Image (tube, grey):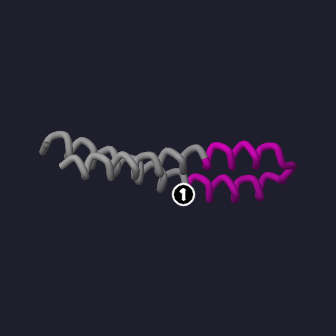
Amino acid sequence: MEMLIWIGAVISLVGVAGLVWCVLAAARARRETLDDAAMNARLQRLVAWNMGALAISAIGLMMVVIGILLG
């Protein structure tokens, strides 16, 4: 079960890296001078990526907890 814990930790870190990327992309979009429609379109795409990264991170954390409980 130790392998499940390590794999889950790596997956969770990939999700956290995705979350950091989303924050940086949103900050970059905010610095650009875009009209409201373009800003909304970009942020809507970022929300989708953010939710995906959050889901990946949650799956990784679930794998870690299951590995701990079974180990």
Specify whether residue 2 is painted magenta: no
- Which residue sits at x=53%, y=47%? 17
- Residue 63 drawn at (x, y percent): 27, 49
* Quadrant in the rendering for residue 30: top right
Amino acid type for the residue under numbered disc 1: Ala
Residue 43 colored magenta? yes
Q: Main secondary structure of the magenta part?
A: helix
Q: Nearer the viewer, residue 61 or 5?
A: 5
Res 37 quadrant in image: bottom right
Q: Residue furthest left?
A: 70
Instruction: Work out which residue is located at the far right of the displayed protein and give it.
Output: 33
Please state which of residues 32 and 20 is positioned toward the viewer in this rendering: 20
- Quadrant (top left, top right, bottom left, bottom right) of the C terminus: top left
Kindly identify the residue that appears in the image at 54 percent across and 51 percent down. Answer: 18
Q: How far across and down, in percent of the image, does residue 19 sit?
A: 54, 46
Residue 60 placement, left or right of 30: left
Kindly identify the residue that appears in the image at 67 percent across and 44 percent down: 24
Q: Nearer the viewer, residue 61 or 41?
A: 61
Residue matched to label 1:
48
- Tell me the quarter of the picture where residue 64 sits: top left
Position of residue 21 measured from the top left corner of the image (x, y, whole percent): 61, 49
Q: Which residue is at a point 61% across and 54% down the rendered structure image?
A: 46
Locate residue 65 relative to residue 20 in the image: left or right: left
Q: Residues within 10 Å of mark 1 (few under 14, many from 20)?
A: few
Secondary element at tag 1 = helix
The residue range painted magenta reads 21-48
The image position of residue 13, as x and y in percent, is 45, 46
Residue that lies at the very extreme toward the front in this rendered image: 2
